[in-house]
Image: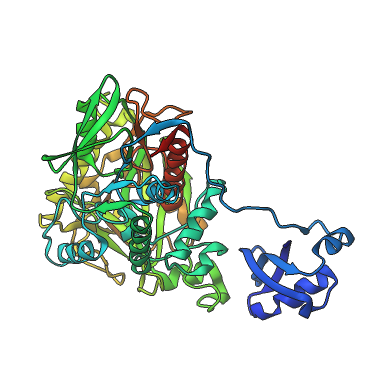
Amino acid sequence: MIRVSEIRLSIDDNLDILPYKISKILKIKPNEIINLNIFKESIDARRRGKIDFVYTVDVKVEDEEKILLKNKDKKVIKTPDLDYKYPEQGSLIIDKRPVVIGTGPAGLFAALILAEMGYKPLVFERGEDVDKRSKTVDLFWKTGQLNEESNVQFGEGGAGTFSDGKLTTRIKDPRCRKVLSEFVKAGAPEEIMYSFKPHIGTDLLKGVVKNIRKRIIDLGGDVRFESKVTNLTIKDGKIIDVEINYREKVETDIVVLAIGHSARDTFEMLYEKGIEIIQKPFAIGVRIEHPQSLINKVQYKQFANHKRLGPADYRLTYHTSNGRSVYTFCMCPGGKVVAAASEEGRVVTNGMSEYLRDKENANSALLVSVTGEDFEGSHPLAGMYFQRKWEEIAYKVGGGDFIAPAQLVGDFLKNRSSKRIGNVKPSYAPGVKMTKIDECLPYYVTLAMREAILNMDKKLKGFALKEAIITGVETRSSSPIRIVRNDKSFESVNVRGLYPAGEGAGYAGGIVSAAVDGIKIAEKIIEKYRFI
């Protein structure tokens, strides 16, 4: 095929004109185009009063070599081969099935690649399958009744199942297309393959992860839910089995440890087993909510609410005078703030959107960087204990029952308690208590947030809206630890056969990067071992 880049369409142009634009560039007739696929879509809003969509398109035509020889335009090249290449199998023989712990993106994709290559993985997930899990989570949001083993953090699909299903990533790994293509095969919209800001939405993502699970099983794998890994047996520096639910032992030579960033009891078990873990910087803060209509107007101006654009988003960063990085994270257009606790007596918030992103509010995490100097000790799990401390304080400030502390931005900037809810209605369930956010975050975090909000308002007018609402606390943006692994083999540095993977192990941040890390882990296993 031939790849044609930098094809510009105005915001009101129909995609039907793409063949005509392409035919002019290739100097052929439109009817000579046999087929075309959009490879990439981006948006150019740099010129005031004008928005263009810019496309890269792969085109199938007759006599491609002849057209490429004649056309000297740098925007026209032979389409690169981006098909995923499976690794060659290694020479070491294993006869025990590899074990994958966790069904978040890293675990699912490690299991999928292993299954595709005939390794018949055994997948263990502490939480419930996505259908049961959804009912459990809904019950929690309505009543405050928490299941500590199956919740927003644990269960089929991982923490990303209850998010916006964002598929944007800063990594430039060709495996990203393998991830997106598998999502499409599993029922995700085809537009995620090329969209400038791809997302699935939590409502569609539930079906996608279920279909990936079914594919793993069809290929010879097994997936078991409500199956928590409670112990690992290590002998002579090598993994030999895993314990499930304190009673069943499964022998194996290979364990993919894709446990997610909130598996705190598992972190403690790994530390007690002597597996090397180190502290990792992360960030804490709040969720901030604005009217989605405000964000649309500020970002798109006269094009606000245009059908081609959808709800607007934003990404803001600021470096404060006290040396802290403050940034927005996991911005959810037309979404809601959700209760994301996984332990009793602790409040945690997160954001979520469905595919249509049609709720009244926009929300985003507003986070401040924290490091080992803030964690009150050098213990490898000190960051985890730091998270717990502020989650417990937030629970008490909210008054219990997972009610979250909240405050108007105007009151927060003036350092006074909020007594009422303004025009922006908080979306967090089970509910909020209007109070003072300073009571449930470190002073240096709230100090940095105040400075950042005022400066972010200069970039996004309305960010410091007095009636906007902040809800605390957000502590789970990334893992507080790194399970140290060998740079070449990806195994734990002190336990052979143990492969830390994904966000929980400290090697990814987001759905796509975690999935890519899972693929890399599977490749390392396949390149070393042959399963019989």
Q: Is residue 43 above or below residue 391?
A: below
Q: For the view shown, which residue lies furthest in the right direction?
A: 70
Q: Left of 261 or right of it: where is 434?
A: left
User: Can residue 59 be seen by looking at this rendering?
Assistant: yes
Q: For the view shown, which residue lies furthest in the top direction?
A: 236
Examine the image and state in which quarter residue 441 appears.
top left
Examine the image and state in which quarter residue 420 appears.
bottom left
Give me the residue at 35% from left, 26% from top.
496
The quadrant of the rendering that contains the C terminus is top left
User: Can residue 385 be seen by looking at this rendering?
Assistant: no
Q: Is 80 or 172 nearer to us in this picture? A: 80
Q: Is residue 103 above or below residue 209?
A: above
Q: Position of residue 77 (x, y in %)?
A: 77, 57
Q: Position of residue 233 (x, y in %)?
A: 21, 29
Q: For the view shown, which residue lies furthest in the front direction?
A: 532
Give me the residue at 42% from left, 60% from top.
463
Q: Left of 114 or right of it: where is 386?
A: left
Q: Is 84 or 277 nearer to us in this picture? A: 84
The quadrant of the rendering that contains the N terminus is bottom right
Q: Is residue 30 above or below residue 424?
A: below
Q: Position of residue 168 (x, y in %)?
A: 49, 55
Q: Position of residue 394 (x, y in %)?
A: 18, 49
Give me the residue at 33% from left, 65% from top.
206
